[in-house]
Amino acid sequence: MARASRLRGLTGLLLLVTLSACERGCLATWLRGHGLGEVPTAPTIPKGSEAACPEGLARCRDGVVEVSRAYTPPGACSPEGCRCPWDRLITCKRGCVVDGMEMEMPRENAEKQLCAGDIGPAVARPAPPGFVPDGGPADPEVLEAYCEVERFHCAQGTLYRCDSGQAKPVVQCQGGCVQGEALVVEDISVEAATALLCVR
């Protein structure tokens, strides 16, 4: 039962990650009220309800790092969605790690994590065969559940890659994960996932 609940939550997580930031915000109230059911064809958010546009998202587009800002539209979003505000932080000297991908990330980490740069052994090292994190092995059922919806998962300072539903440790993050648990749904390289999810 607990695993089924986790899977249902992760299915909802996949839905939220793959939608644009504003769509994700506009749908939040509807999803909470309908137990993560099917997406309505024309989501709206009533005036005065919770913020439609969430804080805590970051992206890098065309070499520019941006972070989302909470915002409540003065009225309801249209069926096409509403435009959410993004704050421009910096222009990357060497471009983005991955262009256009949105992910949850603290504002203070966005610049270092999203801009391309060299990843040395002080940041990450390959996980040797049989590697076990310092905090002990991760719960295999939890990792399996995460692999239902994502490509990479970072927890306990270890970057896991999901392959055929199995999570395999591939990198040790020397400074830990950028968040307690961080994820990437898109299919990117191990190098890019390391740059995004291991603290730099």
Image (tube, grey):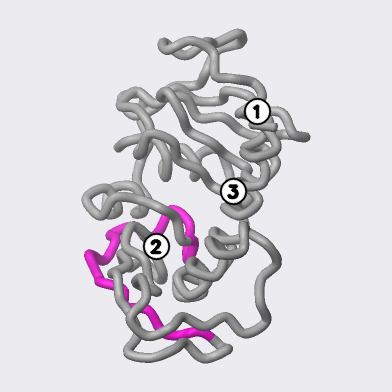
Q: Which residue is mark 1?
A: 167
Q: Residue 155: image x %, image y %?
A: 46, 29
Near mark 3 (Cα within 10 A), the count class, few <14, some 14-19 or many ≥20, is few
Taking depth in this image into account, of 3 and 104 the one nearest to the observer is 3
Q: Which residue is mark 3?
A: 188
Label 1–label 2 contact, CB within 8 A: no
Give the amino acid type for the residue marked by disc 3 in the picture. Ile
Taking depth in this image into account, of 108 and 15 the one nearest to the observer is 15
Give the amino acid type for the residue marked by disc 1 in the picture. Ala
**What is the spatial separation of the Cα atoms under label 3 and label 1, in whole angstroms?**
15 Å
Please, what secondary structure does the residue beneath circle 2 have? Answer: strand
Near mark 2 (Cα within 10 A), the count class, few <14, some 14-19 or many ≥20, is many
Label 3–label 1 contact, CB within 8 A: no
On screen, residue 168 versus residue 71, left or right, reads right
Q: Establish if 196 lies above or below 67.
A: above
Q: Establish if 90 lies above or below 141.
A: below
Residue at 34%, 46% in the rendered image = 117
Label 3–label 2 contact, CB within 8 A: no
Q: Which residues are magenta?
A: 81-101
Q: Which residue is mark 2?
A: 59
Lower position in the chain sequence, tag 1 or tag 2: 2
Give the amino acid type for the residue marked by disc 2 in the picture. Arg
In this view, the mark in front (3 or 2): 2
Residue at 62%, 37% in the rendered image = 146
On screen, residue 119 versus residue 142, left or right, reads left
